[in-house]
DNA sequence: GTCTATAGGATGATAGAC
DNA sequence: GTCTATCATCCTATAGAC
């Protein structure tokens, strides 16, 4: 605690842990947008406002960086679920509270999509292993801590995967234009979260956009 | 129809359409395994038993090849659904028939996963656009042709996305080892399809395995 | 802690022969 | 219809200065 905790100012020297976290957040956004292979350490560096070799230096390798992103995402996810459960304790509908907690993770841009990209990379020996372990960790949380039945857990996870897919496919782009898209989106997203959707629509081609050319 | 329809023999000259289909199937497997960016035209070529430049030559570009894979996958998907509906006509449970039809597409290795990879690439201007259109096409089929309610369609698609995720994450690897994995897998896959699962377990590190090194 | 320079290894695509 | 050879990028990672 040598230095007072303050805002992390890009372009400035800062302590290792602070910069690490900053890069981790940038990486989450970029990996979420382009996937593990599609994301470049350079894009992460630009998003974080540091040099590309420095990104590699901090984490050792692109793979290690992605693993760190997954780790952080899983922590936030389980943390949000446990918080929702604690806040609910005893009351009527744990599933609804968990669902809201899940959807609120959308505010951490790229988080759910980075997870999704990890999930779909099961054939990679190291990423796949971590993804499976993480997924099962969540499943156990649902069954054991949240008290879901196997059927409830299935339904909950299924809805989550569909939500992830809708975010990944950027279905919000067609929201105004297409009645089917609207109906589908409305059924996927809790009404409370519509402000997040409009936010998403604006981000259409954000800083971490598709492959430059 | 100049040449009698026969088996496509690798290493032999064949008609354009025939070879095209062969490469398309190989590409489906490779894209399913490694994703759009992670797959290389060279890996597709090796899987198909032709040269890398020839793969590019046939389709024009890697992107065009992936689009062709998506096209084919969507055709099979909607075809399977319509066939299931026709075979069911009037009987009790269209949803069950559709679910089986969906899961049976697993036999076309890489098909559902290539779709899934396309779905989470929404930020790509051309791939994302096709993915959205395809997804909405399926949604409309469910609502209009299959007569699903919005809630039913949601549930059906959600289960489908979870199934895709389980295949992508290769959860079958943990099937024997982990009780939670077993319970989850059993709830995701119709019991009739367990032979496909064991098949999948064998394919653990198949020909189109993870990045060579 | 952070940067610049750059090596070294793919990979998509083109040219051109057979 | 299909191949070999090869170019031009792009990208991760290392070296080394400040």
Image: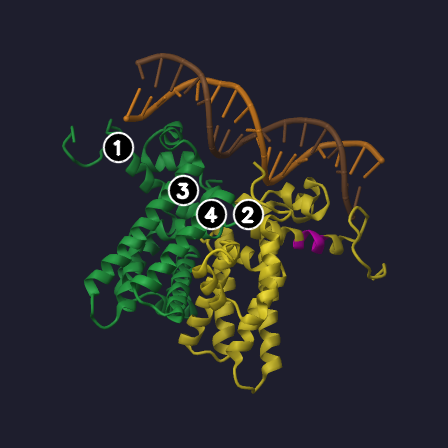
Chain colours: A green, B yellow, C orange, D brown
User: Can you give x and y, in whole percent of width and height, for residue A111 in the image?
Assistant: 35, 50
Chain where mark 4 sits: A
Span shown in magenta: B20-25
Left-right relation of A61 to B69 = left
Magenta includes B85?
no
Question: What's the CA distance linking mark 1 and mark 3?
Answer: 24 Å
Residue topped by disc 4: A129
Name the one closer to the observer, B153 or B97. B97
Tell me if B45 is positioned left or right of B35 in this view.
Answer: right
Q: Residues within 10 Å of mark 2 (few under 14, many from 20)?
A: many
Q: Nearer the viewer, mark 4 or mark 3?
A: 4
Binning the other alpha carbons within 10 Å of mark 3 as few (below 14), some (14 to 19) or many (20 upward) gives some
The one nearer the camera, B154 or A60, is A60
For discs 1 and 3, the disc positioned in front in the rendered view: 3
Q: What is the chief secondary structure element of the magenta stretch?
A: helix
Q: Secondary structure at mark 2?
A: helix
Identify residue for label 3.
A67
In the rendered structure, find residue A10 and report the number of the disc placed on it: 1
Which secondary structure lies at badge 1? loop
Alpha-carbon span between mark 4 and mark 1: 34 Å
Sooner in the amino-acid sequence: mark 4 or mark 3: 3
Relative image position of residue A114 (x, y in whole percent): 40, 49
Q: Tell me the subunit letter for badge 2.
A: B
Q: Quickly name the residue at label 2.
A: B34
């Amino acid at each position: 605690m040598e230095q007072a905790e303050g805002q992390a100012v890009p372009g400035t020297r800062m302590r290792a842990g602070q910069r690490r976290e900053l890069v981790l957040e940038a990486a989450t956004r970029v990996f979420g947008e382009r996937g593990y292979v599609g994301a470049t350490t350079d894009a992460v560096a630009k998003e974080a406002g540091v040099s590309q070799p420095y990104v590699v230096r901090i984490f050792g390798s692109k793979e290690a960086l992605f693993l760190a992103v997954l780790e952080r995402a899983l922590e936030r996810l389980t943390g949000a679920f446990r918080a929702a459960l604690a806040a609910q304790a005893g009351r009527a509908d744990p599933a609804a509270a968990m669902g809201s907690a899940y959807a609120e993770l959308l505010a951490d841009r790229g988080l759910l999509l980075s997870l999704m990209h990890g999930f779909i990379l099961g054939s990679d020996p190291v990423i796949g292993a971590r993804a499976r372990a993480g997924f099962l960790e969540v499943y156990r949380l649902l069954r054991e801590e949240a008290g879901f039945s196997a059927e409830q857990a299935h339904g909950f996870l299924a809805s989550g995967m569909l939500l992830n897919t809708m975010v990944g496919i950027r279905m919000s782009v067609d929201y105004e234009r297409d009645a089917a898209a609207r109906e589908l989106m409305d059924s996927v997203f809790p009404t409370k979260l519509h402000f997040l959707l409009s936010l998403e629509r604006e981000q259409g081609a954000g800083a971490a956009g598709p492959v430059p050319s």
